[in-house]
Amino acid sequence: MRGFDYQRAHDVSGALALLDADPEARFLGGGTNLVDLMKAGVERPVRLVDVRELPLAQVELPQGGGLRIGATVTNSDLAAHPEVRRRYPALAQAVLAGASGQLRNMATVGGNLLQRTRCAYFTDVTKACNKRIPGSGCPAIEGEHRNHAILGASGHCVAVHPSDMGVALTAFDAVVSYQTADGPGELPFSDFYVPVGDSPHRETALPPGALITGVTLPPAPVAAHSRYRKVRERASYAFAIGSIAAALDVHDGVVGDVRLAFGAVASRPWRAREAERLLTGAPADAESFAAAADAELAAAKPLPHNAYKVDLIRNLVVAVLTELTEEAVR
Ligand code: SF4
């Protein structure tokens, strides 16, 4: 591992100043992804600015509903918060589906949003990878891509975003807050991750040097009736090969408000807006759920070894929405 300086920031302006002093510096949260990438030689910062002591570790309850989650709230604290579990159960379930207890104790909300793909070519510095070295190629397209994208990919990169938490945040219209030396800013989650296009090394719309300070969830009564379901290759601890965050209101057998997002299918958590549009006002039955899933997945372009994800996501949509419907009419 390349040698690096380590400095601990105690307030936001101090953290920004420490980063600004060195363009090759990185903010350090829990380090559960960044430090692994440093060991592998993928990330080679000359300085780490530790932000874990910043006063951003609170889950706040704004008047009028919703949540404001500080960037340094740990995954464990977020999943255990009673109002997260009550107002946004799919978010708590998504966080608990990720990693192990030890990792969740360290990992932070801000860091979770910035974690990198687990594509094996990306983490192997002996291999070409457009995300790591722009223009070097994408060996996954002709190589190992069982766990790669079926939606929104490009001929330059077919990697998926690994976050479970991000799938629930996408479904609930989260807004990311950040701070730069020029002042504060916000990004709706739908704009936070940029499309892959021909520049997969550029992953978010954050300005250079920005520090994520928190995530706000707007009030969403439907979110109280929500679920996160993750499919992975081993039950104990693994990244998703497909996942879904869903929330559903049913009145007299008809779908009211509905939220759907998919994980492990694209370079970012995938909001299923076409499926939501078709479902709103439709009968709350398996036929409608399957038709909505098919409409959303019509845009899928699977590779030879990951076509299974189309059926997997379709089955998840039908199963989870059916469960939520049965609970709604009890
Ligand atoms: Fe790199 Fe993306 Fe291709 Fe993986 S899928 S090898 S991350 S360019």
Image: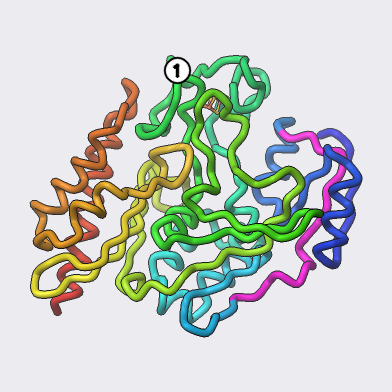
Picture layout, residue 147 above or below residue 305: below
Q: Residue at image x 43%, y 75%?
A: 85
Rendering quarter of residue 126: top right
- Label 1 element class: loop
What residue do we see at 31% from left, 55% from top? 260
Quick check: 214 above or below 133?
A: below
- Left or right for 263, reference 321: right
Q: For the residue with label 1, is its CB less than 8 Å from the closest atom of ligand 1?
A: no
Please name the residue that numbered disc 1 is placed on. Answer: 143
Instruction: Work out which quarter of the rendered image holds the C terminus and state it.
Output: bottom left
| Residue 77: image location, x then y, percent | 59, 72
Q: Is any atom of residue 190 visible in this view?
A: yes
Q: Residue furthest front?
A: 182
Majority SS type along the magenta span: loop
Question: Is residue 155 found left or right of 78 in the rendered image?
Answer: left
Residue 283 image offset from top left, x and y in percent: 9, 61
Q: Residue at x 12, y 59 (%)?
A: 282
Quadrant in the picture for residue 148: top left
Range of magenta residues: 43-59
- Please tell me which residue lies in front, 188 or 113: 188
In the image, residue 202 sits, relative to residue 130, either above or below, namely below
